[in-house]
Each structure stands twice: as C-alpha cells, then as structure tokens.
Amino acid sequence: MEEAAVIVERLERIDRLRHEGAPAAELLAELRELLGEAEAWAQVEGGDAGERAVSRLRAALARDFAAA
C-alpha cells in the first residue's frame, strides 16, 4: 500500500503544478517520476492489471512528450 500512497501524492503534486501553470518540462519530469513509481507499484502488486496500468501510463507519457 505504501507504493499506492506515493502514486497518489505524485498525482496530487502534478495536478497542483498543472493548475499553477508550471512549465511543460517540469510537468514532464513529474510524469517520468510517476512512471517509475507506477512500475514499482506494479511489481509489488503483481498481476496483469498493474502491468496494463503502467503500459497505459507509458503510452500517455509518450503521446504527451511527442506533442510538447
């Protein structure tokens, strides 16, 4: 559960930064950190659901990076 709490905190930080108008580079750095944390969570939780969530996050990050 500790991994899930870390992810929630990161998501809240990203949301706050987005609302504050943080630069794209700062948001992207936070998203990269989120990806690493999500991978750690998926390893602890195991199963296909965690892996699918990480894959979706990775794809969204790739799309956002390409658009920036």
Image: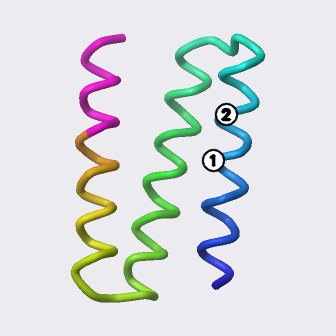
- Say whether residue 17 is left or right of residue 26: right
Identity of the residue drawn at 61% across and 23% down: 26
Q: Position of residue 48 (x, y in %)?
A: 22, 80
Q: Position of residue 19 (x, y in %)?
A: 72, 19
- Say whether residue 47 is left or right of residue 42: left
Q: CA distance from mark 1 to mark 2?
A: 6 Å
Quarter holding residue 53: bottom left
63 in relation to 35, above or below: above
Q: Which residue is mark 2?
A: 15
User: Could you tell me what secondary structure mostly forms the magenta stretch?
Assistant: helix
The residue segment tinted magenta is 60-68
Which three-letter amino acid code belongs to the residue tagged 2? Asp
Colour treatment of the image? rainbow
Residue closest to the eye, 35 or 48: 48
Q: Residues within 10 Å of mark 2 (few under 14, many from 20)?
A: some
Q: Which residue is mark 1?
A: 11
Identity of the residue drawn at 62% across and 11% down: 23
Q: Residues within 10 Å of mark 1 (few under 14, many from 20)?
A: some
Q: Indicate the secondary structure of the residue bearing disc 2.
A: helix
Q: Which of the image's four quarters has the C terminus? A: top left
68 in relation to 5, above or below: above
Is residue 61 one of those drawn in magenta?
A: yes
Identity of the residue drawn at 66% across and 59% down: 8
Whether the residues at callouts 1 and 2 have beta carbons within 8 Å, the answer is: yes
Is residue 9 one of those drawn in magenta?
A: no
Quarter holding residue 46: bottom left
How many numbered badges does the structure rendering display? 2
